Amino acid sequence: MDNEEPNALERFIEKTRSLFAAEPDLEKRWTALTPVLAELLADPEVLEASKSWPDCVPRDGRAENLLFYEDPDYGFAINGLTKGNARQGGRARIHDHAHIYTLYGVLDGHERIERYDRLDDRSKPDYAEIRLASDKHVGPGEIDLVRPYEVHTETTVGERTVALIIRSQKGGSFNQGRYKPETNEYYESLGPRQTPVEMLPL
Ligand SMILES: [Fe+2]
């Protein structure tokens, strides 16, 4: 790769590492990362490659993410999330991402992003009251910044969707909050399994 132009993924990693080195404030850092992700989402090579990424399959109560990269110094991770035909009509669980920051960007297809407000005082361990705060139809290039403990879900609308997800820490090794608003139940379980995949195969 020595004499070749960096590809979109390499450019994204380089810009993200520079930003993380320069900006210690998490809120500013993750806000500033949004246009960097927008560039990655706009890259035609990435979109083309995404058509061949394998479908993510939930199993044993766990979601699956494609793992494209984990940064050895800053710890951020680059994930893909593909929802193919098997996922249509299926409703993703309402959840949070625990302590991490996340940028969720739509690369291909359309879906709905629901955001919820937490209403109770968190004093009861198995209990949570939440209320729908927004329900947005999103498509390619749109990016949702999910801050620590923000409650949300994404719902398919009858087409294959692909998202690129940047997390401040690779998921899967720590519990995330789960919410059942019908019964006000709250529980925690491990985040998505991480399946290593080449984002831009040669
Ligand atoms: Fe999420």
Image: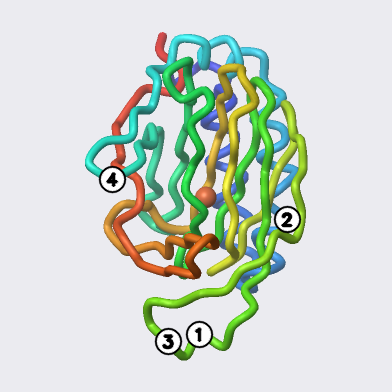
Of the 4 image quadrants, the one containing the C terminus is top left
Where in the figure is residue 195, as x and y percent of width and height? 29, 33
Of the numbered discs in the image, which one, if any, rests on residue 124?
3
How far apart are the alpha carbons under marks 2 and 4?
A: 34 Å
Q: Are marks 1 and 4 in contact (CB under 8 Å)?
A: no
Question: SS at mark 1?
Answer: loop
Give the residue drawn at x 61%, y 49%: 103
Which amino acid is tagged 3? Lys
Q: Which residue is mark 1?
A: 122
How far apart are the alpha carbons under marks 2 and 3?
A: 36 Å
Query: Vertical placement of 75 versus 143: above or below?
Result: below
How far apart are the alpha carbons under marks 1 and 4?
A: 24 Å
How far apart are the alpha carbons under marks 3 and 4?
A: 24 Å
Number of other residues with Cα within 10 Å of mark 3, as a class: few under 14, some 14 to 19, many 20 or more: few
Give the residue drawn at x 42%, y 86%: 124
Of the numbered discs in the image, which one, if any, rests on residue 61?
4
Which mark sits nearer the N-terminus, 1 or 4? 4
How far apart are the alpha carbons under marks 3 and 1?
A: 6 Å
Tell which tag, 2 or 3, sits nearer the viewer.
3
Number of other residues with Cα within 10 Å of mark 2, as a class: few under 14, some 14 to 19, many 20 or more: some
Which amino acid is tagged 1? Arg
Which mark sits nearer the N-terminus, 3 or 4? 4
Which color scheme does this rendered protein use?
rainbow
